[in-house]
Image: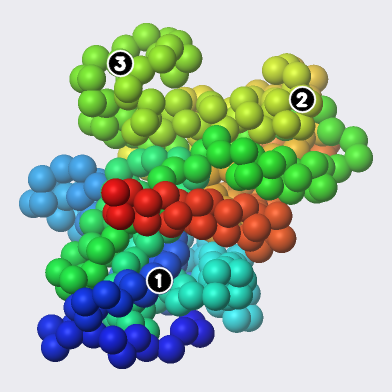
Amino acid sequence: MSASPNSSTAADGSPAPGTPAATGYLLVNLGTPASPSVADVRAYLNEFLMDPYVLDTPWLLRRLIVSGFILPFRPKQSAAAYQAIWQEDGSPLLIHSQALQAAMAVKLNEPVGLAMGYGEPGISAAVAQLLAHGVEHLVIVPLYPHYADSTVTTCVEAVQAQLPPHVSTSVLPPFYQQPVYIDALAQSVRDQLPEHWDHLLLSYHGLPERHLTRCDPTGSHCLAQADCCRQPSPAHATCYRHQIYATSDALAAALGISGDRYSVSFQSRLGRLPWLQPYTDQVLRELPARGIKALAVACPAFVADNLETLEEMGMQGRETFLAAGGESFHLIPCLNTAPQWVDALTALVNNHSAAARVETSA
């Protein structure tokens, strides 16, 4: 971070009368273990899965499920997956997120912090660093294009819990269909599509179906009918599935791809509850039988490559598709720090900040 502390503050730490509030920005991504060791992965999974927005059961039952059925077995499997993608400098997700933070600090010329919802750098340390730079208005930037309680809500609440009363906040809304984001995503996909491909699979991180119905403010729209995501409703403001389809439709239109040349699926399901369908692993097994032999895959739920894109999709997904009779599998990287993405996020943040200032002064 590059800004100097603001010395125009009152004794209680609030800005002195007439002093413009110094603005800072906090990028928040999901998280990563400190290392690919079994112990560090276990600690990370424990923190992640004990979040009530992730595993939405009463605390005692959640503790029983995590400690009794997940942590004794899953850390070893997950550690092996992390080891397959770990880079010399650390976790790919952290490396890409830090590079994005640095690029945004240059663009914004104001303090920009980075926090992981789980693992390090933690939210409390990132907030403390921004406060040390004199920040009195914090723009929280969840690095998730689409809304979900298990991503956006939990990180926003965690950040706000660390702030003193005099620090105000605003939150960058989900940007799943903002033109600058769609343009950046389309440019990235267009630049990295192979010369020959039959089909583009857009694989998104999955969610349990009940996460959608829990967020439905109408209590009667989400998943109530097959085309609920296509029917106008106030529920769409917090409906992950609707926002996924909105991104996919806008991306296909920007790329000039007809409906029969792309499809949507959901990966990373856990447990036996019904999750959003179709499941990516099943789709990968079925596509070759439909004559799709050359597959391109993008994962637009993520803005930075991570375990789910690099290992689950790039390794396991590739193996599944080729074993089912596919001939070529091309994984398109996430946006990471593509220049058009850095410019798009800068524009989104600047527009949001300008609107927040107008609202505050009104």
From mark 1 to mark 3, how far is it between C-alphas?
A: 38 Å
**Mark 3, residue position:** 221
Label 1 or label 2, whichever comes before in sequence order: 1
**Under tag 1, what secondary structure?**
strand
On screen, residue 349 above or below 161: above
Q: Residue furthest front?
A: 18
First-in-chain label (1 vs 3)? 1
Q: Tell me which colouring the rendered structure shows.
A: rainbow
At label 2, the amino acid type is Ile
Residue 284 numbered mark, or none: none
Q: Position of residue 252 (x, y in %)?
A: 70, 28
Instruction: Indicate which label's residue lies in the foreground, 1 or 2.
Output: 1
SS at circle 3: loop
Q: Is residue 110 left or right of residue 202?
A: left
Q: Can residue 290 be seen in this snapshot?
A: yes
Check disc 2 and report its element: helix, strand or loop.
loop
* Disc 2 packing (10 Å; few <14; some 14–19; many ≥20): some
Up the image or down, 150 lies above or below 92; here it is above
Residue 315: x %, y % from top left: 65, 52
Name the residue: 24% across, 15% down.
220
Amino acid type, callout 3: His
In the picture, measured across the screen, residue 46 lies left or right of residue 164, that is right
Q: Residue at x 43, y 12 (%)?
A: 231
Disc 3 crowd, CA 10 A, few/some/many (<14, 14-19, 20+): many
What label does residue 24 carry, if any? 1
Q: CA distance from mark 1 to mark 2?
A: 39 Å
Q: Which residue is mark 2?
A: 257
